Amino acid sequence: MPGPRQKRREHDRELALAYLAVGSVDEVRLDRVIDDHIKRVLEATDQNLSLTADLLGMHRRSLQRYVRRKQQRGRRKKKRAQAKRGRAKRAGR
């Protein structure tokens, strides 16, 4: 059974999420907020990296590296998921 501090912490967390109008903590994580903001600006500029970097106040090359790293991470996650499905299929035979 949770103690009074635990209950208070959960209550405060729920109030904060309601105030921010989000459904989960994942939506307010800093890395997620940054990713979403960059994606929105990229979409608004039709994927123009120079203009996006200028609007975000960062160097174009830094934005290029950021986008490349995100794409590589996405590919790795996809490959891992495919490998996991493959192993599950082989195990089910």
Image (cartoon, rainbow, N blue to C red):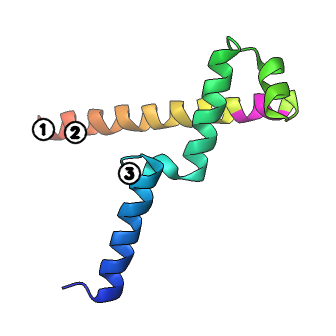
For this view, does 2 lie left or right of residue 13? Answer: left
**Position in image of residue 74 (x %, y %):** 52, 33
Q: Which residue is mark 1?
A: 92
In three-dimensional space, the C-alpha distance between marks 1 and 2, rounded to whole angstroms, equals 6 Å
Q: What residue sits 24% from the left and 84% below the top?
A: 2
Q: Mark 2 and mark 1 in contact (Cβ < 8 Å)?
A: yes
Q: Mark 2 and mark 3 in contact (Cβ < 8 Å)?
A: no
In the image, residue 5 above or below residue 49: below
Secondary element under disc 3, as helix, strand or loop, is: loop
**How many numbered dots are placed on residues in this image?**
3
For this view, does 38 lie left or right of residue 17? Answer: right
- Using a 10 Å C-alpha cutoff, classify the residue at mark 3 as few (fewer than 14 neighbours), some (14 to 19) or many (20 or more): few
**Position in image of residue 57 (x %, y %):** 85, 35
For this view, does 9 lie left or right of residue 61? Answer: left
Q: Which residue is mark 2?
A: 88
- Mark closer to the chain start, 3 or 1: 3
Q: Nearer the viewer, residue 37 or 87?
A: 37
Q: Which residue is mark 3?
A: 24
**Position in image of residue 70 (x %, y %):** 62, 34
